[in-house]
Amino acid sequence: MGKVTDRNTGLPINGALVQLFHSGQVRFQTTTNANGDYQFIGVQPRGYNAVASKAGYQQQAFGIKPRNNQTTTVNFQLVPTGGTISGHVEDANTMADISGATIEIFLGSTLVTTTTTNATGDYSVTNLLAPNSYRVVASATGYQSAFKSITLSAGGSAVADFELVPTPATLMGTVLDAVTTNPISGATVQVFSGTTQVASTDTDGTGNYTIAMLAPGNYTVRCSAQFYQTAVSGALISAGVNTLNFLLNPDTGAIEGQVTDAINGQPLGGATVEVKQGGVVVATLLTDPSGLYNADDLLPGSYTVTASHPGYQTKTVGAIVVSGMTTTVNIALDPLPGTIAGNVSNGGPIANASITISNSNGIVGNAVTDANGDYSVSGLAPGSYLVSCAATGFQSQFKAAIVTSGTTTTVNFVFIADGGTLEGNVIDSGTTDPIPGARIEVFQGTTLITSTLTDGSGDYQTLTSFRVNIRFGRVQQITKQKLSAQRSLM
């Protein structure tokens, strides 16, 4: 029993043939498993030649003599069979041998070995791992590089001859930023013949490049740089100096974000978003139902983003776009303010009446009526308000108001001159206990003039619309029905 491995890699060899010869005859044979292991059972104790072989490897043999009732271990390390690539390099025009040409042999993208041609332009590379496919590249000063793909069988040989084309032409130029016209240092300029790259270089600190020794003909020239869009140009290159300049556009960026209501944070679908650069509109779009927008393909630089929506104040913010990046700009729009306006009178206009407007945050606006009794308070955010009105000689009044975006809510006040004081006591008719928190409403006709609540002792006091003081005694009975009284006063 034993194991068969690759001597170079140490990896097991699957399917290697292992044979035991005695007197020139094969007595036992088997193949290794995936782990490179093999085993013979029932081998008689005599002399054998153990031989291991595998395609692509050199054969290995050992003399062995198993002992009776014992296990003999024989391991093999097979040496891969090397292949050979050889050839000749000459001038494509004159057929002259090219001495000192560089030959590079690649396995995939890995450089396996390098050699040079001798005085007669010949080269030979042996002991190449086979079977395998190789790429052979030939280059020489003053010539275009060339390559060939070679398939090499185990122990075999292959020929790769080259006829190199002289490169007498020169291509030069400058690479600039298309926006700023500043030179771009480190830009890569590549020259292709068909799909094969024949030359490449980078621009210097001033954005200049030079590629010499190109053979005249049609080429494709590609220019690329980090943070810029690649540019490609065809070029008919003739003998001598040829100029090809490039203007590279910076990689574009994007602006994205969400438009929301500044009060409740809800997204605003259908909002208009306008993106400007230097006062010029470069993108106009609408937000989706989630209030989201995205403006792409923007050149690097400074922008303004303006969002608008019916019923909301337009808002503009600044944004910086960076090459290849997305800038997030979220915009919260304030609802258009509303207005509360109205008139204060008592059969005629009341001038200089004091108007106070408040909400849950406190007082948000004040006004004084003009000679016509009119007032107006603008710039109010949509929502609920309490409007109070005070005028000399009159009892203050309070009214609730709802302000909606961009509209005017009318709240008028009509005053009746102050009268006297109404006071009294509310008790339970059964127990005669005072009733705190009972609501007292005073009407003139069917018009509610004022209202109040009893205190902890069941007492109440309020100003009335009447011009005399009226004192009511204790109420001996109260029901859930609204009690009203009418009295004519002089």
Image: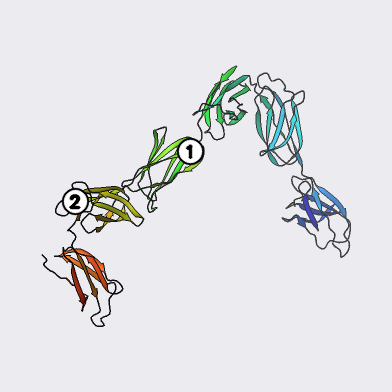
Q: Around disc 1, counting alpha carbons within 10 Å, would you say few (fewer than 14), some (14 to 19), or many (20 or more)?
A: some
- Where is residue 325 drawn, in percent x and y? 51, 41
- Give the labeled residue for mark 1: 321
Q: Amino acid at mark 1?
A: Val
Q: How many marks?
A: 2
- Where is residue 342 drawn, in percent x and y? 22, 51
The quadrant holding residue 243 is: top right
Q: Nearer the viewer, mark 2 or mark 1?
A: 2
Q: Nearer the viewer, residue 223 or 302?
A: 302
- Where is residue 67 drawn, in percent x and y? 89, 61
Mark seen at residue 339: none
Q: Nearer the viewer, residue 359 or 196?
A: 359
Q: CA distance from mark 2 to mark 1?
A: 59 Å
Give the vertical position of 323 relative to 361 (above or below). above
**In the shown orientation, is residue 222 left or right of residue 115?**
left
- Give the labeled residue for mark 2: 350
Q: Amino acid at mark 2?
A: Ile
